[in-house]
Image (cartoon, helix red, strand yellow):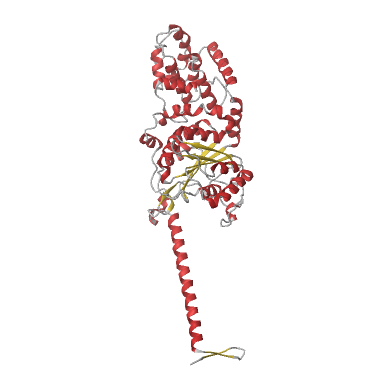
């Protein structure tokens, strides 16, 4: 029987049996499609929520798992990164709009669902370093208080890194080496003590050396008795720790003429040190403006060996930056195809960052292209990293695989925009084994667009040196080549044989 439908206007529409059945079926299919779409969207939103909060954190324990905001990481409205134009249309331009609220940096870890908050305390730096059998020196505080004792004085009024270099340049001058044992910095004092023991092998038998150096050694007695190498020096000079000994020894300070002569020799060596004046100006600029240094690290399974090299380099590099480069903050971003974890920029990276670095494990992956572009984009997004506007900003990407070819142009555009508009320097360090090499496709072009540098690294020594060059610039490479081995010895005690210590000094 046909279906009759009357319109408000008075007209009557007659539908045959086959026609109104088809209309009913179409309406039913549309309703089914709408319901299916709604279910899919709900499932996707649920997965995103699951990746945001760790499944191991129950509602009752949520207060216990609140994110810990680093002391100096709370951003303010003034500390917002520059606005960049993202070349990919799929990314909302609102992500780069200046003035939006920045999120505080939190400690995060990788879970199956994505990024989650740490629900348990992280292992101490010293414990991790002991597990890796890296260093006896790691337990020494970077800011050890001097307490009561003789006055300290520097032979050269310059940064710690320059004073360390000048100490090694004075290795054959035992008088100058002794004078460094009252330097204001405890690590430089210890380095001077160890250098004296290595270079002054015949101190116990050489009466003339003992006579000339005893007043200077006696002046540093209060510092020498605190350290094992210092107590050995006191024994060689027959100076007891309670102050008895050579009757002609100065009680507190080295004799003035010894000190003046040593100071003149050090100033002359500073003038001969290649590029030291430019290096000092670079350090002064960092002290004035600050430097933000973000490591962006690929953690896929193929990075297992390079990760071991990076951990060993970070064990001394992170501590050395905190010790010797004022106003520097260091952060970390981990990625595979997507970003897995972020540790915000910290002015105390040996405490806030190094435990995370040493606990990273390589896993997952399988496909050759990795999310290099996604990692860069995330590091520049507002609210992800609390970049300081006036600071010198460095992004150092360490990886063994290129980005997707379809993202090459987008990466180059973003790197160029971030360098031009925000003052960022984008560096790429390719890592690999000596047999396979470490030249990664596209990386050289990426670094050129980002105003940074590209280098291939096959061991931890190269990684540390290249990271320093990224921070200070290729103009200082000749001077910077002297630093990594000195810093590894200072913070890791990596060189043990006396012949190798001399090799460190010579180079």
Identity of the residue drawn at 59% across and 48% down: 414
Relative to the observer, which residue lies in front, 6 or 481?
481
- Percent position (x, y) of residue 163? 53, 23
Work out which residue is located at the far front of the displayed protein and give it.
435
Question: Against 44, is 325 above or below?
Answer: above
Which quadrant of the figure has residue 55?
Answer: bottom left
Q: Is residue 368 visible?
A: yes
Question: Against 150, is 346 above or below?
Answer: below
- Percent position (x, y) of residue 299? 44, 45
Which quadrant of the figure has residue 90?
Answer: bottom right
Identity of the residue drawn at 60% across and 48% down: 413
Question: Against 156, is 342 above or below?
Answer: below
Relative to the observer, which residue lies in front, 297 or 179?
297
The number of discs equals 0
- Percent position (x, y) of residue 457? 48, 36
Work out which residue is located at the far right of the displayed protein and give it.
421
- Percent position (x, y) of residue 229? 40, 20
Q: Is residue 239 visible?
A: no
Q: In the visual, does 391 lie left or right of 437?
A: right
Question: Against 210, is 275 above or below?
Answer: below
Work out which residue is located at the far bottom of the displayed protein and give it.
1
């Amino acid at each position: 029987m046909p279906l009759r439908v009357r319109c408000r206007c008075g007209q009557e529409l007659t539908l045959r049996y086959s026609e109104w059945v088809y209309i009913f079926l179409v309406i039913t299919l549309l309703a089914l499609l709408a319901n299916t779409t709604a279910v899919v969207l709900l499932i996707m939103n649920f997965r995103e929520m699951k990746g945001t909060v760790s499944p191991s954190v129950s509602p009752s324990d949520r207060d216990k798992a609140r994110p810990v905001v680093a002391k100096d990481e709370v951003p303010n409205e003034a500390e917002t990164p520059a606005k960049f134009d993202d070349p990919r249309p799929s990314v909302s331009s609102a992500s780069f709009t200046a003035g939006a609220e920045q999120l505080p940096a939190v400690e995060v870890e990788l879970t199956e669902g994505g990024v989650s908050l740490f629900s348990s305390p992280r292992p101490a730096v010293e414990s991790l370093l002991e597990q890796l059998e890296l260093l006896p020196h790691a337990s020494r505080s970077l800011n050890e208080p001097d307490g009561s004792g003789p006055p300290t004085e520097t032979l050269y009024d310059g940064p710690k890194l320059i004073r360390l270099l000048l100490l090694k340049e004075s290795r054959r001058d035992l008088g100058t080496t002794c004078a460094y044992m009252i330097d204001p910095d405890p690590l430089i004092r210890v380095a001077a003590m160890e250098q004296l023991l290595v270079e002054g092998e015949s101190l116990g038998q050489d009466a003339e050396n003992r006579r000339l150096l005893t007043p200077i050694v006696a002046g540093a007695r209060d510092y020498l008795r605190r350290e094992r190498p210092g107590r050995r020096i006191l024994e060689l000079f027959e100076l007891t720790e309670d102050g008895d000994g050579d009757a002609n020894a100065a009680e507190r300070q080295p004799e003035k003429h010894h000190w003046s002569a040593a100071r003149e020799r050090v100033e002359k060596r500073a003038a001969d040190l290649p590029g030291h004046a430019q290096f000092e100006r670079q350090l002064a600029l960092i002290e004035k403006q600050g430097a933000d240094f973000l490591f962006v690290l690929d953690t896929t399974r193929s990075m297992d060996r390079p990760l071991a090299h990076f951990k060993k380099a970070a064990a001394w590099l992170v501590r050395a930056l905190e010790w010797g480069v004022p106003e520097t903050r260091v952060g970390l971003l981990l990625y595979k195809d997507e970003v897995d974890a972020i540790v915000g920029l910290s002015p105390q990276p040996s405490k806030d960052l190094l435990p995370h670095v040493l606990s990273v494990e390589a896993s997952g992956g399988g496909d050759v292209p990795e999310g290099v572009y996604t990692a860069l984009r995330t590091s520049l997004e507002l609210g992800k990293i609390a970049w300081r506007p006036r600071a010198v900003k460095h992004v150092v990407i360490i990886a063994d695989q290129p980005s997707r070819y379809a993202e090459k142009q987008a990466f180059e555009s973003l790197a160029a925009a971030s360098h031009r508009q925000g003052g960022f320097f984008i560096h790429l360090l390719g890592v690999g084994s000596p047999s396979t090499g470490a030249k990664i496709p596209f990386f050289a072009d990426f670094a050129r667009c980002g105003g940074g540098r590209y280098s291939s690294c096959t061991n931890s020594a190269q990684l540390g040196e290249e990271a320093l060059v990224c921070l200070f610039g290729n103009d200082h490479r000749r001077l910077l080549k002297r630093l990594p081995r000195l810093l590894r010895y200072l913070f890791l005690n990596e060189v043990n044989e006396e012949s190798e210590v001399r090799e460190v000094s010579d180079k």
